[in-house]
Image (spheres, rainbow, N blue to C red):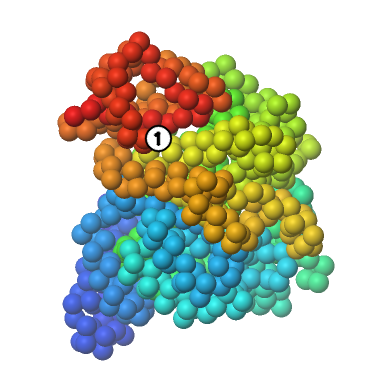
Amino acid sequence: MSEHEPIFLAQRTLERLQPRLETEFSAYAAQNPRAWGQFQTRLKQHFPRLFQILLHLYGNQYDFFYHIEVLLRLMAHAWTARDAELQALDAAREEHPNWFQSHQMLGGVCYTDLFAGNLAGIREKIPYFKTLGLTILHLMPLFKSPEGENDGGYAISSYREVDPRLGTMEELRALAKELRAEGISLVLDFVFNHTSSEHEWAVKARAGNPVYQDYYRMYPNRQMPDAYEAHLREIFPDEHPGAFTYFDDIDQWVWTTFHSNQWDLNYANPEVFNQMANEMLFLANQGVEVLRLDAVAFIWKELGTTCENLPEAHMLIQAFNAIARIAAPALLFKSEAIVHPDEVAKYIHSEECQLSYNPLLMALLWNSLATREVDLLHYSMSNRFALPPGCAWVNYVRCHDDIGWTFSDEDASALGINAFDHRQFLNAFFTGVFEGSFGRGLPFQENPKTRDARISGTCASLAGLEKAITEETEVEVDIAIRRILLIHNVILSIGGIPLIYLGDEVGTLNDYSYRQNPAKADDSRWVHRPEADPELYALSTDESTISGKIFHGLRNLIELRKSTPIIQQGLPEFIDSGNPHVFAYRHADEATNILFLNNFSDQPQTVSNNVLRLCNLAFPLVDMVSGTVINGDSVLSLAPCQYLWLQSES
């Protein structure tokens, strides 16, 4: 096949199917000619890209063109069901595609039930979200899921039903609309690697329906599971060894990468792709503006490979992206890929995932707190922070999940660091085993065979506040607060979209009561998912309290960010501060020049004035954080865990 033939086939296919589409939706087109014209324009623009991807994935299927027609019809149905307000948002976002690149952007993430009880409670929190400065709200999975252990809602039984304890889909749609009116975009998870074993498709597969059995990967014996597992790594060895679970009631081995009640979908089946595209567009039509694509690395399976980060996984996401451009153009994707940094970067593109978590920055912020050194942070950010045009990092200090040490072994080696040994140190440090550690985290999914482990814990407990309050003095409490604000300062000022796990802004500590709940006791991540503490939020208004110091310190940084457009204008320039404890970067253009210094040491540090001169800064300087004017000296001094935004005084 020549390179031009797929384009010709796409055009010919659309020409042949277009009349049937026009006939089916003629009534809508007559009543809404402008909206139908927009759909047609986008279809012609993006269908060739979509078709070529699907031809590669499914072109060998005997009924390939049947599935293409089904997809065209479901996209048209989704567009004609999309309300006028969302269609207007689509047009606005097409006109300003980089809307999310603004320095005004700030994200918050929470569990609906743990933060506010239910969707009605979230609605009541909108004034608080605005006070904090949020423009993005990510609600963790809130769909119908199995009772008991459900991986924090990531075992989804229906993409179209809200967990009845939280509310209804109508309430979610109304909440999205109200948030949008207040300038806050709603983010939800699109858990598209797997469904729960209680999903309608899985129930039908379990009952022996061959159509739905082909929605999953099910095997009657160990021959194929063994062949696949020869190349797979274990994700949750505590849950089940390998990637398959045997169900004696159906005498089948089912592919379950993560948990036994999460059945991996079979994307080699084009019907599965179409069904999930339909679910995606349904969520977009509820007013969801960003979908966090869960577990992107695992969605395509191929015998003889690790079944992670395969080229077809990228193609699937690109196909979903093209569908969104046609039927819900306002919708953005945010990738969740906790894998090697080189692989993380491959998911980030305007035609794939426009947004991406930045797990490398997250992991290295904690690394720098533990080591008090910034060499690996500086080296990795200097080489890995750049992104394609039209894309942005989502920078965070922690999320609902564990912390994995996903730095590059190659980066570590370049600095003379043994990556394996260093990860062992970090695990020991943040679980409090390492002598002198301030961290109070818990290990998650320790694998005795590989000695791999990750870390659970709230920001405050990992940063030393728990230990300081229970074992130490006000001096250590102050240092812990400084650490919390320091790492948040980096995510707020480095560029990209900062994301705050709600509760961290008031210094929430680990909650060990999860151990008394049988559904949660075996998952240490629940230690950092406590219910919002009303007392902490009440204290946050008093700057003399711990919660108040953290909240007001963070609010000041948020306001400073929102008044500093240069933060989002181009990439930061990473600067060698000449001090192994000080992480430095600069945002500059012809009119503005700001140097950001971050002292990761518990001790005072200095930076040579030569660094300032090389950054074209001259005394007197103004620290934008404190408003302090700094006059010339041979060195610039930073207090323990202090951060400065330096500008020459005008």
Left or right: where 513 falls relative to 264: right
Position of residue 59 measured from the top left corner of the image (x, y, whole percent): 44, 60
Residue farthest top in this picture: 634
Whether 187 is drawn above or below 355: the answer is below
Which residue appears farthest toward the right when viewing the image?
248
Return the residue nearer the eye: 629 or 458.
629
The one of 58 and 396 positioned closer to us in this rendering: 396
**Residue sitting at 64 percent across and 57 percent down?**
530
Q: Is residue 205 above or below residue 433?
A: below
Q: Position of residue 94 (x, y in %)?
A: 24, 60
Amino acid type, residue under disc 1 in the picture = Phe
Left/right of residue 23 with respect to residue 69 in the rendered view: left
Q: Residue 212: where, in percent of width, then height?
A: 62, 73
Quadrant housing residue 529: bottom right
Quarter of the image with the C terminus is top left
Q: Can residue 579 be seen at all in this image of the molecule?
A: yes
Examine the image and state in which quarter residue 622 appears.
Answer: top left
Number of numbered labels in the structure image = 1
Front residue of this view, candidates 446 and 409: 446
Residue under circle 1?
Answer: 385
Q: Position of residue 359 (x, y in %)?
A: 51, 41
Tell me which residue sits at (62%, 47%) in the image. 458
Nearer to me, 455 or 222: 455
Q: Secondary structure at mark 1?
A: loop
Relative side of 60 to 37, left or right? right
On the question of residue 320 being in view, the answer is no
**Residue, x 66% and y 45% (percent of image)?**
456
Category of crowding for the residue at label 1, using alpha-carbon neighbours closer than 10 angstroms: few (below 14), some (14–19), many (at least 20): some
Name the residue rendered at 71%, 32% in the picture: 428
